[in-house]
Amino acid sequence: QVELVESGGGSVQAGGSLRLSCARFGDSDCTYHMSWYRQATGSEREFVSSIAPDGVTGYADSVKGRFTISRDNAKTSVNLQMNSLNPEDTAMYYCKALVVPPRGGPGCVVGKAYWGQGTQVTVSS
């Protein structure tokens, strides 16, 4: 079983910065593709950024040049540095871990996704 714990959310003024962290616990034998998503009130959950096992990163157009995803060397946590925040970035931010090949131990189900509980980011104008 995998548990994801997000932290670092809060309230900032437009132009400010926040750094989100997502710590992953459990099933360390698996290979994970890690992502950040966000969901604003009344909107669907949307992709923000991702980092693949080989380190390749991806970003939504709306955050390119402002957000940076990174991870620790042990690949047990990912961070999202968010700069130049604006009110449109206000949302609950969720961490996602997707099990991908190569398959690790017997508990690693390729395609299985785990989600954290989310951390709130509020940007005021």
Image: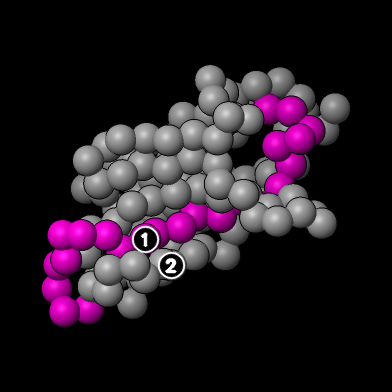
Check disc 1 and give the amino acid type: Leu
Residue at point 76%, 54% (across, down): 43
Does residue 21 show up magenta in the picture? no
Q: Which residue is mark 2?
A: 114
Residue at point 82%, 56% (across, down): 42
Check disc 2 and give the amino acid type: Tyr
Residue at point 27%, 60% (across, down): 100
As drawn, the residue found furthest toward the right would be 125
Using the image, determine if residue 90 lies above or below residue 111. above
Q: Which of these two is toward me, 53 or 24? A: 53
- Residue 7 seen from this side: no
Using the image, determine if residue 13 lies above or below residue 8. above
- Residue 64 seen from this side: yes
Q: Are marks 2 and 1 in contact (CB under 8 Å)?
A: yes
Q: Which of these two is toward me, 41 or 122? A: 41
Q: Judge the density around disc 2: few (<14), some (14-19), many (≥20) Cα neighbours within 10 Å.
A: some
Q: Is residue 93 left or right of residue 77?
A: right
Residue 98: mark in rendering: 1
Labels 2 and 1: the sequence-earlier one: 1
